[in-house]
Image (spheres, coloured by chain):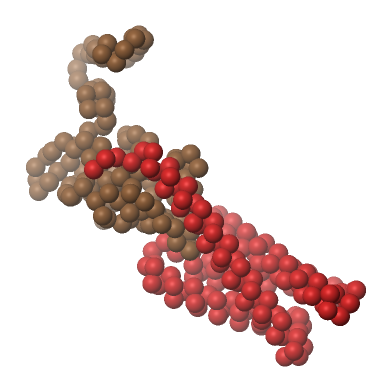
Amino acid sequence: MKVEIRQVDSPDQERAEIHAVKITEDIQRAIDILDHNCCVLSVTDQGRTLLCSADKIYYFESIDKKTYVYTKDACYETGYRLYELETMLGSNFLRIAKAMILNIRKIRSVKGEMNGRMTAHLLNGEKVIIARSYVKDFKERLGI
Amino acid sequence: MRKKLQIIFSQTMMISTAILFGVGVQMLIYHLAYGTEDLHWPWYLPLTFVFSGFLCALPTMALLYDDEISAKQLGIREAIHFVLVGVLVSLCGYLFQWYETVAEYIPILIMYVVIYFFVWIATIWLMKRDEKMINAALEEIRDEE
């Protein structure tokens, strides 16, 4: 698809126009991002399909080949695998363990441990472990 | 596997350097206290430092570098690690004749305890410094809830 960008002077003038034969999955994703200023994921909750804005997501966890999505006070399931989510989501989402991706904007604070791993205290009171081998990436993402 | 080898290598280097540092401090004390001017080593002694460093790196790798353990388990493992590495240092010292009498063994034991705690204090200091930097960076991007 041909992409044309014209610079405007103020945020009020910002608009996106899409000319497409069909709304494909990729185009829908782009619409979601432009509409919500973030990515939206389809998740399931007891058989119901819902849309969940990425900025509401705290972390993703993979258990027994299923991917779970955790928000402030709810847990959903999604069909995406962690490696797919890693490429789909923005830079706020970071792999912190083999089976977990965390939204770093939801971290209240971190605490180091003697074996090199870190405990992240989240805004909803939960605690998750940042595995030692991912601490370096985490620091790099924060520009440290 | 590559990461594990890297950790073992860096631990070996760190422990060997710590042993050398310990010997250096011991000789400085002997020089200041008794005026000792020379130190004579058998040809194999420097290699025994590296070998001992490698041996001591193995329990560190096996006991402490595990992401799946709880904080309580980690505390227990740290205590086991302290004792185990102490036993290994003593054993290496005995086998490689770093000491021959109890009077020679005691400074080695003291040196081990001092170096061990110095390394832990340095590790805690680095960890706290990282924590502080990360928490400051998170402050900038944290969502409002």
Seen in the picture, residue A70 relative to B51 is either above or below; the reply is above
Please give left or right for residue A139 compared with residue A34 in the image.
right
Instruction: Kindly identify the residue that appears in the image at 36 percent across and 38 percent down.
Output: B141
In this view of the protein, which residue sits in the foreground, A123 or A66? A123
Seen in the picture, residue B25 relative to A23 is either above or below; the reply is below
Instruction: Kindly identify the residue that appears in the image at 13 percent across and 38 percent down.
Output: A50
- Residue A74 at x, y percent in the picture: 17, 49
Residue with the most extreme bottom position: B102
Please give left or right for residue B12 compared with residue A115 in the image.
right
- Residue A115 at x, y percent in the picture: 48, 63
Q: Which chain is red?
A: B
- The number of discs equals 0
Q: Quadrant of residue B2?
A: bottom right
Please give left or right for residue B134 compared with residue B100 in the image.
left
| Residue B92 seen anywhere in this rendered image of the structure | no
Q: Quadrant of the N terminus of chain A?
A: top left
| Residue A55 seen anywhere in this rendered image of the structure | yes
Instruction: Kindly identify the residue that appears in the image at 49 percent across and 56 percent down.
Output: B128
Seen in the picture, residue B12 relative to A47 is either above or below; the reply is below
- Residue A129 at x, y percent in the picture: 36, 56
In this view of the protein, which residue sits in the foreground, B115 or A32? B115
Instruction: Kindly identify the residue that appears in the image at 74 percent across and 68 percent down.
Output: B20
- The shade of chain A is brown
Q: Quadrant of residue B122?
A: bottom right
- Residue B100 at x, y percent in the picture: 77, 88
